[in-house]
Image: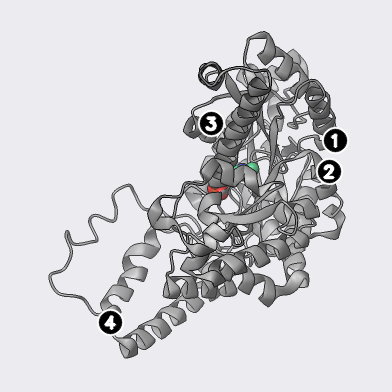
Amino acid sequence: MDSSQFRQAAHAAIDQIIDYYDNIRDRRVLSEVQPGYLRELIPPGIPQTGEKWEDIQRDIEAKIMPGLTHWQSPNFLAFFPANSSYPGILGDMYSGAFTCAAFNWQCSPAVTELETIVLDNVGRLVHLPEEFLSAGEGGGVIQGTASEAIAVVVVAARDRYLAQSKATWAAEGLSEDEIEEKVCTLRGKLVALGSDQAHSSTKKAAMIAGVRCETIETAMGEYKLTGEQLTAKIADLQARGLVPFYLTATLGTTPTCATDDFPSLSAALAAHHASTPLKIWTHIDAAYAGAALVLPEFAHLPATFAFADSFNFNMHKWLLTNFDCSCLYVRRRRDLTDALSITPAYLRNEYSDSGLVTDYRDWQIPLGRRFRSLKAWFVTRSYGADGLIAHVRKSMDCGKEFTKLVKGDAKRYTLVAEPAYALNVVRVNPPPELEIPVDSDGGKEFRKRSNEVTRKVAERINREGKIFITSTVLGKGDESVTAIRVVGGAPRVQVSDLQNAYRVISEAVDAVWA
Ligand code: PLP
């Protein structure tokens, strides 16, 4: 493809993308294809001679679109959103054009320097305490996903804990061999913690870091981790000879968007740390709900992060920035670089050696990295703080409208958790003619019937494909509750889309009841 062919192809691609967005509401939100559909549509092998762009582009509509679930559709109410926007797309376009795998400052100073500036600005936008920004000992870095961010901090937490332990043993006068022996034993005892509502990425990070992982059960109906539960878990681990070194605390859990009780967690950690120089690293995972911290009514929350060592949220979920852009902030950047820095001779250069520049390769797992800050820069400049606040506010209004509708329809629905950050979690009641009392038999029969109909309603809705929702299961065994999650965070979603969703879900309820 030469320059003039690229110009033509790029214009045609952009026209197609604009048409796609303009008409996205008309597409069935959920793909209907069966596994393996694409093999039948794509000829085997690579063509011997190159094809024309028009032929390649034609396959987007014919072969790719049928297999897409339209995450940008206002009828996408499942999981959490994954926002895209035109400024974000432009950022990815330039990043692709420049393709500088800027693992260290010298590779492309603009890539590193823009990332530091943009992350400081975004940190201030979400009202993060200054300690997490680059002027002091902290700083932000863009990771691909929240899971990557959590993997990075678990590795850093493990190494910090081991380093602090080594220092303690050295101060006690132990020899190097003795210390090494003790480190080997300690490694097998380290435990990463998260609540039963924390995202599975904590477990995966523990697997990657080669440490144990245990969950702390939260109270049914509350779904938030408290200091009391943490203290009890620490005591239990210590009684079993195990060593807690890391905790994921969540702002906006995946199942219900609950937020752990930060003040009591902070007090519990302070009490634990009063008895030992070895600190539990606490990470606040706000992958989705962190975007809501742009709103003035949540601006006070980050002040409660004082006990945390690190924080992440995904601009690519709810802040109009195309996947992937997960912002990770740490209180002490040296904790990351101590754990992740490795400098073979071919990576040495005078700038890195001077200690005056940031080499983001030491803040992440891979070496190479894309120019992701460009899209965050374009998005924050194009929308401004007001535009980003308006976007999140609109989703919150959508969530409130859905809450109002289900609360007004007690015959069909019960909210199973406090609605939060535009997410509603509801269960469908059993058919009224069965006249099952909510609390007879400890609520067992009601739950069983409610779980059955809720599951069927969710399956029916997604089979119809007018809207896309996800279901979840809260609690265990006889106590478990199946619920439907509804969250309207796509860029084009309107309050009327949630009114429509309520109608679609209610029609499905009536059909399942019948
Ligand atoms: N943490 C929370 C609270 C989440 O809800 C999710 C995904 O929805 C994740 C982490 C994982 O996100 P990612 O796909 O960016 O790894």
Q: Are marks 1 and 2 in contact (CB under 8 Å)?
A: yes
Label 1 crowd (10 A; few <14 / some 14-19 / many >=20) = some
Horizontally, is 230 left or right of 461 in the view? right
Mark 1 and mark 2: span between their CA atoms? 7 Å
Q: Which marked residue is nearer to the observer: mark 2 or mark 4?
A: 2
State whether residue 231 is above or below residue 50: above
The amino acid marked with disc number 1 is: Pro
Q: Is residue 42 above or below residue 238?
A: below
Residue to which mark 3 is pinned: 206
Question: Residue drawn 50% across and 32% down?
Answer: 209
Q: What's the CA distance linking mark 4 and mark 3?
A: 45 Å
Is 447 on the left-hand or right-hand side of 390?
A: left
- Give residue 259's position: percent from left, percent from top: 76, 39
Q: Position of residue 403 (x, y in %)?
A: 77, 48
User: Pointer 1: what residue?
Assistant: 263
Q: Amino acid at mark 4?
A: Met
In-front residue for pair 250/482: 250
